[in-house]
Image: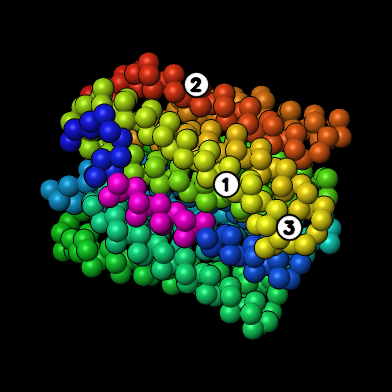
Amino acid sequence: MQIDKKLFTKEYKDLFWPLLVEQIFLTLIGNFNVFLFSLFNDQMVAAIGISDQLLNIFAMITNIVVLGASILIIQNAEKSRLTYVKSILKESIILNAVLAILIVIAVFLFNKNLLMLMQTPRELLEETSIYIKIVSISIIFLAMTSLILGCLRAFGFVKIAVKVSVTNTLLVILGNSIIVIFNLGGISNIALATLISRLLGVLLTLFTLKKYIPELFDLKKELRKIPLKKEILSLGIPSAMEQISYNFSQTIITAIIASLGTIAVSSKIYTQTITSFIFSIGVAAGVAGNLVIGNLYRNKNYDQIKYFAVRNANRISLIAAAVNLILALFGQFLVRIFTDNPEIIKIVRELLFFQILLDPMRVANEVLVNSLNVLKDVKFPVIVGIITTYALVIPLSYLFVKKLGFDISYVWLVFILDESLRRFILTKRFKSKRWIKKVDYNDEK
């Protein structure tokens, strides 16, 4: 496949737009939930926001397997290699089941300790503990759903995968809405509705995979005995570590912000809720880029890969900046959807203008990291992310908030510095083409 000087070719559009719809609906579930929970009070928003920050970390652990398996599936997405793909799926499901069981045990034993480490306000501790224990059980459902949807996309069923993903999202929204609108209970029933909805979602996803790629369910054919666990983990661990490191750092920073009080935590959540659609653009561009680069990779069109990846990141960054500017200008109206608290409204309006500088960098980094992962240059983004996060972001956030007593806006300035530095380094990595050595080395193996 050839990539010309025009980035948004028909083939790219056919991948990007369905994926963008999917990501927006995935974002919608979080936004709609925040709106639902705000009907109770700002305290419930803060409680579930803190819980979800921890749950994201746990989900990233299972994502180690999903990412490693997805890379292998993209590279082998051919009808002639279905037996091999079947082996990848089998090994991945086993690995994820083991990880999920260990995570649930850890959550049930140590959830309050973890929440206290995050400086969760005491008045929120009990409700937050109940929510996180119940929802943690659904982590295995999320992992399996992500893996299967990735398989469908790799084999060209992008629009089908989008329809399934959107349906799964609507199931969760419907379950939570029934609980809240009909006043059927508090946070524990919301957690149960989320759990049941995600179970139904994974069953629907499995049914869809069987319908469109039935060969993967053909038990009569003997699976090739290939030792795939090591290969899945060798690709998945570095790929996921970048995301795990980011989410873990966000958990620490949420704890730092929580020391400023519930208003600061709620302001952070509302700001990220309003702008979360922007990151959806980056995720969609990253996944679409992966599929395009996967085809170029098989043909060893390395010059085309370099041009496409950097241009993809730059164009998506400009789109993100434009959308963020619109959101910032209308911020005072958007935040009132969630709260009437004047202190929160003031903080969120200010943070939305900082997002104009932050989100373009974030989406560009999402695209560049995804592109490097598909090319098996999985360690470099992790090293860069860990160094900038733990040598820059966390120390400066702690210094500004805990030592100097600055407000939350200074944390956003640190975020902008971090994402800008990472974008500069990752872009240089792509332009240097040092990732070609990783591709050649892995192919020789």
Which amino acid type corresponds to the residue marked 1 in the rendered image?
Answer: Ile
Q: Which residue is mark 2?
A: 425
Looking at the image, what colour scheme do you see?
Answer: rainbow
State the extent of the magenta-drawn residues as a range.
13-27
Q: What x and y, as percent, mark residue 148?
A: 34, 57
Calculate the distance from the C-alpha at mark 3 to the C-alpha at mark 1.
26 Å
Calculate the distance from the C-alpha at mark 3 to the C-alpha at mark 2.
35 Å
Q: Quadrant of residue 299?
A: top left
**Mark 2 or mark 1, whichever is nearer to me:** 1
Label 1 crowd (10 A; few <14 / some 14-19 / many >=20)? few
Q: Is residue 369 magenta?
A: no
Please give the name of the residue rendered at 82% of the width and 52% of the height, measured from the top-left corner.
343
Please give the name of the residue rendered at 86% of the width and 30% of the height, measured from the top-left corner.
404
Q: Is residue 363 above or below residue 421?
A: below
**Mark 3 or mark 1, whichever is nearer to me:** 1
- Give the mark nearest the N terminus, 3 or 1: 3
Q: Looking at the picture, tell me which residue is in the foreground, 11 or 120.
A: 11
- Give the mark nearest the N terminus, 3 or 2: 3
Which amino acid type corresponds to the residue marked 2 in the rendered image?
Answer: Ile
141 horizontally vs 290: left or right: right
Q: What x and y, as percent, mark residue 38?
A: 70, 66
Q: Which residue is mark 3?
A: 46
Secondary structure that dominates the magenta span: helix
Q: Is residue 370 above or below residue 183?
A: above
Q: Looking at the picture, tell me which residue is in the foreground, 332 or 69.
A: 332
403 horizontally vs 421: left or right: right
Quarter that holds the C terminus: top left
Q: Which residue is mark 1?
A: 326
Q: In what element is the residue under mark 2?
A: helix
Quarter that holds the N terminus: top left
Q: Looking at the picture, tell me which residue is in the foreground, 223 or 444.
A: 444
